[in-house]
Amino acid sequence: MRKPGIKTLLVILTLVVFAFTVVGCGGGGTDTPAPAGDEKVKVGFIYIGSPGDAGWTFAHEKGRQFLLDQVPNVVTEVVENVGDADAERVLTQLAENGNKIIFATSFGFMDPTINVAAKYPDVTFLHCSGYKVADNVGTYFGRMYQARYLSGLVAGEATETNKIGYVAAHPIPEVIRGINAFTLGVREANPEATVRVVWTNTWYDPAEEKNAANALLDAGCDVIAQHQDTPGPMQAAEAKGKLSIGYNSDMSALAPKAIMTSAVWNWGPYYVETVKAVIGGTWTSSQYWGPMSDGITALAPFGPMVSDQTKNLVEEKKALILSGDWDVFTGPIKDQAGELKVQDAQVMDDGAMLEMMWFVEGVEGSI
Amino acid sequence: MKIGLITLEKRAAPSPIMAVMVPVVSVFMALLVGAIFLKITGREPLPIYFEMFSRAFGTRYGLSETIVKSIPLMLAGLGVAVAFRMQLWNIGGEGQLFMGAFAATWVALSFPDQAAYLLLPLMFFAGCAGGAVWGLLPAIPRAYMGVNEIITTLMLNYVAILWVEYLVYGPWKDPHGYNFPLTAKFTAGAILPTMGDSRIHAGLLFGLTIAVVLWVVFNRTKWGYEVRVIGDSPGAARFAGMNIPRNILVVMAVSGAICGLAGMAEVSGLMHRLQPGFSPGYGYTAIIIAWLAKLNPLAIVLVAFLFGGLQVGGYIVQTTGVPATMVAMLQGSVLFFILGGDILLRYRLRWRRSPDSGAPGKGVGA
């Protein structure tokens, strides 16, 4: 019985392999159409994650689709799930594939972008959230803290326990700036309220983010905000009948009973403008940190639980921010120890905001 | 081991024909499964496969990048194989790799003005030492108290990763880096030389040299023989007067040192700084590589090269519109079938005709 057994197996395998070859060669015609005209401009995108239904990469993906809708003679190439260690090769491939503009959408791609850009002077590179530029490398980011402040107003109005929880990824200036702006909003609406911060030390870990949110809920927080990449914290809040504020993209569909609003990225208009500028030859390297009035950050539509009073307050402050007459980090602002960090009526400069490594008064937690 | 009507029976010696056929058929099966999914989602499998393999192995740039990718896999694979050889299940390659990178970075940041001929050897030894210490920590309780090394090596991975994160988010943060979690860039003296205009760095030489040395040690030295005897039959080894605790310490230290060297080569040859996420789990992939290569050091080099190509090719086909999830699925099915095929190579499937006609006692200790 032994030998026939093996032989039968081999025969089956061979047949299957044969079938595969037939399947592989048999079909045809379902290939995606190649770009017809030679005039099409190729634009490359590299993502740190997969778009999914919500989050950081999803917001960039929406921006890419907006670009395709708005600029007819553009085709795009996308590479997802690129780790920092793989970025240099993927960027090189995108440049080799003939992409004329490449958007690198994660901070960790900074050095690779600069390295590859030096080898491809005819390609324009745009790096999201970094600080290194070159003749053919620009950076782009948005003043998310403005939308964070507005979402803080909503949270401050909503809390009954005067305790708000904030699930945060890593202690870097971007996250800390967001927590501070949010807290300033909370305290503007409700001077009694405090914001408790829990660090997860991860950008993306649904279970860990939920755990952190649950710990905050157990400590008496009744509103959960977050700087993470999944709707986990909001879902934890919904499961306990509490409220929450989303981030990155409009997450209301994923926790509809909990989410009052989300502070969202809206990259589309920036991508359209930039691609048009490069094609038109008017682009020059710069460090773009777009204000809310450019539409790069926004507040997602309010949920039904948000009162008209809150909406009016948000509209009022939003008009002020959009007008450019006032910004979030305008003094007096004290730190956790009560020390005055921004003098009355002074406005913090961009440099100080970009390096921010301290918490404002009203935040409970440490960096 | 019995699964329903099928009995797994260990082969006395795998037949040479099967040894060649099984991997080949496994890869074909994997590609077939992938092809079905590609087809269902309206894509042509053959051009995609062609693109994947030709651009990972068939172009000069692709080949160079495949080699770059294989360096950490090769080193970490060789590292864990040393321990596996003695049936010490060192799952801590990832942590040892991080500690090697940590120690090498410490040298690079502490002596930024030194010349390469001083700095690189120092970083080399620091990397080995960092990994060796991380390998010894679980080896000591294993050697003297019999504490299971699978758990301890695994848990120490998280400690190492969090330690490195603490440093780059805290004391080692680049002072000119706007508080981002990166160390300062290494000075020229701390960077491994590369080959021509490619990114292939001297880490490749470390890997190839260690592979040859290990092959000789395993196959031609008394100590290599001892290690295998201790692994296969500790009772016999003890009876023959071999010092088992001491060998556990030595083997784990060597295993950790080679994994640590993988970390040193990554930061010094490729990243040029320490940053979180510099290893996408090389220490774990290394386990699969060592296993597939049957712990043969020379085969590890080859398997690491194939894995490098699989990963490089995976990114390439994304630009043709294949989603990343599909690529991950393709890579996963290749692994699944190769590992499955490996079972067929070492065990024979027998159909049981009646409940009592199976071959008792000869199965895989079920």
Image: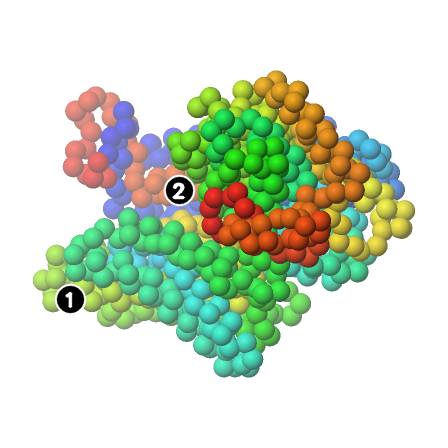
Amino acid of disc 1: Met
Quadrant the N terminus of chain B occupies: top left
Front residue (pair B39, B8) = B39
Residue in the picture at 18% in, 54% down: B146
Around disc 2, counting alpha carbons within 10 Å, would you say few (fewer than 14), some (14 to 19), or many (20 or more)?
some
Horizontal side of residue A205 vs B271, given as left or right: left
| Closer-to-camera residue (B167/A134) | B167
Kindly identify which residue carries mark 1.
B242
According to the image, what is the colour scheme of the structure? rainbow
Q: Position of residue A209 (x, y in %)?
A: 47, 37
Position of residue A99 measured from the top left corner of the image (x, y, whole percent): 77, 48
Secondary element under disc 2, as helix, strand or loop, is helix
Query: Could you tell me how far apart the alpha carbons at marks 2 and 1 are, in whole angstroms?
Result: 34 Å
Tell me if I can see residue B315 in this picture. no
* Horizontal relation, residue B200 to residue B286: left or right: right
Q: Numbered disc 2: what chain? A: B
Disc number at residue B339? 2
Q: In which quarter of the image is residue A227?
A: top right
Q: How crowded is mark 1: few (under 14 residues within 10 Å), some or many (20 or more)?
A: some
Using the image as rendered, state which of residue B353 and residue A102 is in the foreground. A102
Tell which circle, 2 or 1, labels the residue nearer the N-terminal end: 1
Which of the 4 image quarters holds residue B327?
top right
Give the image location of residue A343, x and y in percent. 66, 53
Q: Is residue B245 left or right of residue A119?
A: left
